[in-house]
Amino acid sequence: MCFVFMSGKNTPIFCSEHTSIASLLFLFEMSTTTLKLSILDQSPIIEGSTSIQAIKDTQQLVCKAEEFGYHRYWFSEHHGSASFASASPELMVARAAASTSRIRLGTGGILLGSANALQTAERLRLLQVLADGRIDAGFGRAPGGDQRVVKLLNYNPVDAWNTFDEIQQLLNNPSIPTNSRQAIAVPYLVEPPQLWVLGTSVESAKNAGERGLPYVFGSFIDPTHMSNALRTYHTSFVSKNGSAPYTIIALVAFVAETAEKAEQISECSQRWFVDSFLRSKDVVFPLVNSEMPAPEYSSMEQMVVQMRKQTALIGTAEAVADMLEGYKKKFAVDEFMVVTITQDFEDRVKSYELLSEACGLQR
């Protein structure tokens, strides 16, 4: 059974018979606070640049994100891709931990179908030590690449949630290694990182809710099931050790000083989407300039591009901030994770900076 309350800002608060009073108070407080923003970085590779430069851009951007007041910064995992350079979010987190001091750092996300439970738990515990407890461990069931990659990674989605539960048990085990007990993840006696479930389906939302864990819906990948997934998450949520439901929507945004400029900087990503998702090409993000002819799209491609544009937030900082407020009220979401990919790195940094200022993030 699901109950819905309205907050002071007319934001719906979903809860079930399993929701405690403390959790409900937490939800009410979260619904009345200002927007909380984070960043998901896929280390995109731009035409004319290199994968090495993509990694260097990520290293620079995470420092800027901390300066701008973003709450957390997550790194993606893609394998064998011409488009994205980040194949090991754990290594990216370790590097970022050395150059930041406040912002939370996370994996967005570790691929459960090819993860080894003990190795994953040990890496996460080590990251917790290196980052002074600032680690978010996000997990998903995506394969992380094409069929060639799936084969090399020994991808097995059937056991994904069993692997997840085993990782959680290893992370929560407070024991010290001995010869007479089960294997203990080292370093031991480390506070476990915050675990997150990532997904774009009702199934992933249900798995997150039943485990009492926070949930990230990847609208930037596929927004189709967002409403149903978020509703399912709240109605299936079972509090574990006092946990309260918490949701993030990860979405695409392009922000500039004018609406025209925002449209312009979004074009690189839009054209890549057609080549990658609709034409199944493994390509870098293309360079686009005003002198280039308009791309030739089929009627189906034009329809899909327009649908994608409707789910991306494109405009001035004030306009995009208003759109985020609308999403927050409509979906009772606690936080947004922003994905911005532009051909010019300076435009990308500026987009995040303008949005942080419009949303009043604390520097």
Image: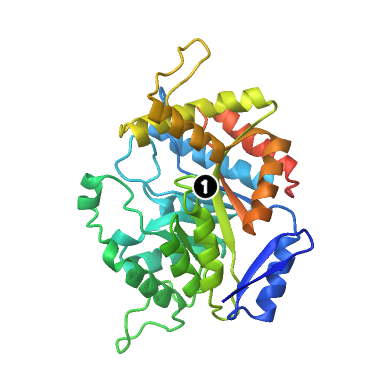
Looking at the picture, does residue 270 appear above or below residue 87?
A: above
Q: Is residue 122 above or below residue 143?
A: below
Which is more toward the observer, 329 or 269? 329
In this orientation, which residue lies closer to the viewer: 202 or 257?
202
Q: Secondary structure at mark 1?
A: strand
- Using the rendered image of the protein, determine whether residue 101 is visible from the camera's viewpoint: no
- The residue shown at (50%, 10%) is 291
Q: Is residue 319 visible?
A: yes
Residue 331, position in %: x, y? 62, 56
In which quarter of the view is residue 221 placed?
top left
Q: Is residue 112 left or right of residue 290?
A: left
Q: What residue is drawn where x is 54% and y is 56%?
A: 227
Image spot of residue 96 (x, y percent): 52, 49
Work out whether 34 lies above or below 56: below
Q: Amino acid at mark 1?
A: Leu
Left or right of 103 on screen, residue 41: left
Residue bearing mark 1: 40
Displayed quadrant of residue 282: top left
What residue lies at 29% left-to-right and 59% top-to-bottom?
114
Report the quarter where the N terminus lies. bottom right
Q: Say which residue appears at 30% left-offset and 89% top-offset.
A: 180
